[in-house]
């Protein structure tokens, strides 16, 4: 691929980023382009280069994919990692006393360490592989409320005589609600909720939050850093401080934040972080719970079977330390390879991902804000990523999604596994368009045109 114009083509391949600004069309054309316009051109060039990493668009020309909050597309490097394992190795890990098995084991453990480092700076951070965010929260809900877990030495709230409680918010995905409801019913915990305001932000003052900690022995705080409905990035710093002060476990649902704001996840220094690989440009069927190894080792088992035992006798068994303790059975090895490639992709392109998020958010905010539709959470401004839930007056979200599909625009419609948040909005469902690094301003324009088409149909 050569540079953009005939004169710049003499400067060499377009992969030379400086050529765009060193070419004679910029030096001698006499054009005095504003720096912002030069940035937009350069940014578009870089963004297109990243988009070219996603074969999906060659397979589906003309399609506008706006469902990345549900599942992100896979770059070539991730697909190659899947193919490499399945074609060239395809062997099981652990206890294989041959070189291919040992090589696969080494790769899985390398990805495990890379995964922990991606979202935690703790020296003893460990990643336990699970099927996804949902299973991750089921694991935590079971183990952290089990009487077999030994958590008092790590979290003083577990030694309190006050009624035990779990603190959640009305903004949470069902993956971070329903497992805690089941655990609370089984273990006698009270569920306490932080309210969501009209925009979907966690709207509680520091004083109100402190009062909750004074009233209950809040042992577990489990909150999403970023909403999958509105893209809002919640300010959890004060709650995190209160959790630490009162000796509670602090858990972050990073399913969305792992892509958009991984550094903010790290900054919270959470006790556990949970995310899914398929939202991070990797495969479905895999996720991770990241926490400190000593805390994992103090927790009760979750699923049992092969691969997690130390000794099996007729009446009882003893178990290995984490991570094996929580990884019964054969792991999805190819998907773990793919996660390693995805983390490399995101790490190498973090600046472009952030700049794309911001550029698309600013452009889409302006375009969607000018329409006569309700966009939820739009007033949160810069504290968001480009995830848009919206309602066209008089049109059900499913009708909106169906008619946009006729225009080759892929969105999601429904309650997005956030029924409590939907109730606070006063709706049963919304349409949701979510953007990623492979999207462009043209995709925003196609969405705006598609919404116009929906409104036209329903005016007939």
Image: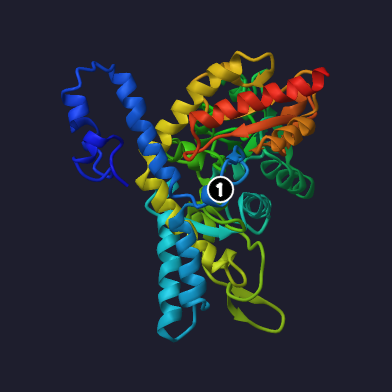
What residue occupies the far right of the structure in this picture?
460
Quarter of the image where one finds residue 444: top right
Residue 203 versus residue 160: which sits nearer the camera?
A: 203
**Seen in the image, is 2 located left or right of residue 60?**
left
Q: Position of residue 340 (x, y in %)?
A: 44, 58
- Residue at image point 62% right, 72% down: 329
Residue 427 in sight from this viewpoint: yes
**Seen in the image, is 292 located left or right of residue 148?**
left
Quarter of the image where one finds residue 209: top right
Quarter of the image where one finds residue 377: top right
Image quadrant containing the C terminus = top right
Q: How is the image coloured?
A: rainbow
- Residue 4 to residue 296: above or below: above
Q: Position of residue 41 (x, y in %)?
A: 35, 28
Q: Which residue is mark 1?
A: 275
- Residue at image point 61% right, 45% down: 158
Q: Position of residue 422 (x, y in %)?
A: 74, 28
Disc 1 packing (10 Å; few <14; some 14–19; many ≥20) = many
- Residue 147 to residue 442: above or below: below
What residue occupies the far bottom of the structure in this picture?
97
What residue occupies the far front of the structure in this picture?
6
**Seen in the image, is 195 located left or right of residue 429?**
left
Q: Position of residue 200 (x, y in %)?
A: 65, 24
Q: Give the structural element (helix, strand or loop) at label 1.
A: strand
Residue 392 versus residue 97: which sits nearer the camera?
A: 392
Tell me how many marks there are. Answer: 1
């Amino acid at each position: 691929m050569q540079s953009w114009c005939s004169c710049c083509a003499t400067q060499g391949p377009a992969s030379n980023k400086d050529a765009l600004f060193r070419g004679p069309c910029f030096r001698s054309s006499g054009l005095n382009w504003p720096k912002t316009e030069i940035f937009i051109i350069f940014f578009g060039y870089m963004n297109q280069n990243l988009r070219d990493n996603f074969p999906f668009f060659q397979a589906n020309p003309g399609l506008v994919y706006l469902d990345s909050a549900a599942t992100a597309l896979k770059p070539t490097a991730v697909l190659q990692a899947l193919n490499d394992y399945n074609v060239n190795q395809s062997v099981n890990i652990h206890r294989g006393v041959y070189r291919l098995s040992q090589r696969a084991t080494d790769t899985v453990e390398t990805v495990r360490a890379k995964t922990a480092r991606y979202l935690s700076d703790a020296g003893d951070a460990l990643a336990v592989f699970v099927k996804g965010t949902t299973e991750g929260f089921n694991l935590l809900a079971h183990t952290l409320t089990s009487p077999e877990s030994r958590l008092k030495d790590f979290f003083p709230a577990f030694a309190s005589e006050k009624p035990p409680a779990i603190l959640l918010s009305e903004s949470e995905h069902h993956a971070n609600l329903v497992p805690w409801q089941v655990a609370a019913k089984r273990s006698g915990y009270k569920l306490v909720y932080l309210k969501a305001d009209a925009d979907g932000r966690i709207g509680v003052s520091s004083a109100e939050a402190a009062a909750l900690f004074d009233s209950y022995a809040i042992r577990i705080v489990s909150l999403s850093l970023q909403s999958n409905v509105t893209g809002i990035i919640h300010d959890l710093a004060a709650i995190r401080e209160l959790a630490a002060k009162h000796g509670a476990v602090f858990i972050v649902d990073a399913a969305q934040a792992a892509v958009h704001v991984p550094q903010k996840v790290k900054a919270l220094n959470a006790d556990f972080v949970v995310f899914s690989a398929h939202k991070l440009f990797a495969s479905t069927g895999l996720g991770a719970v990241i926490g400190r190894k000593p805390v994992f080792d103090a927790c009760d088992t979750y699923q049992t079977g092969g691969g997690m035992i130390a000794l099996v006798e007729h009446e009882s068994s003893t178990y290995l330390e984490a991570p094996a303790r929580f990884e019964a059975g054969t792991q999805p090895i190819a998907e773990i390879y793919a996660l390693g490639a995805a983390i490399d992709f995101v790490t190498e392109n973090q600046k472009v991902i952030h700049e794309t998020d911001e550029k698309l958010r600013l452009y889409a905010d302006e375009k969607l804000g000018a329409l006569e539709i309700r966009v939820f959470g739009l007033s949160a401004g810069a504290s968001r990523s480009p995830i848009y839930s919206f309602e066209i007056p008089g049109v059900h979200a499913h009708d909106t999604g169906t008619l946009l599909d006729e225009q080759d625009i892929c969105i999601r419609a429904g309650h997005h596994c956030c029924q409590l948040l939907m109730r606070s909005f006063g709706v049963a469902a919304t349409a949701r368009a979510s953007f990623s690094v492979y999207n462009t301003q043209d995709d925003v324009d196609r969405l705006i045109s598609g919404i116009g088409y929906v409104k036209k149909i329903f005016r007939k």
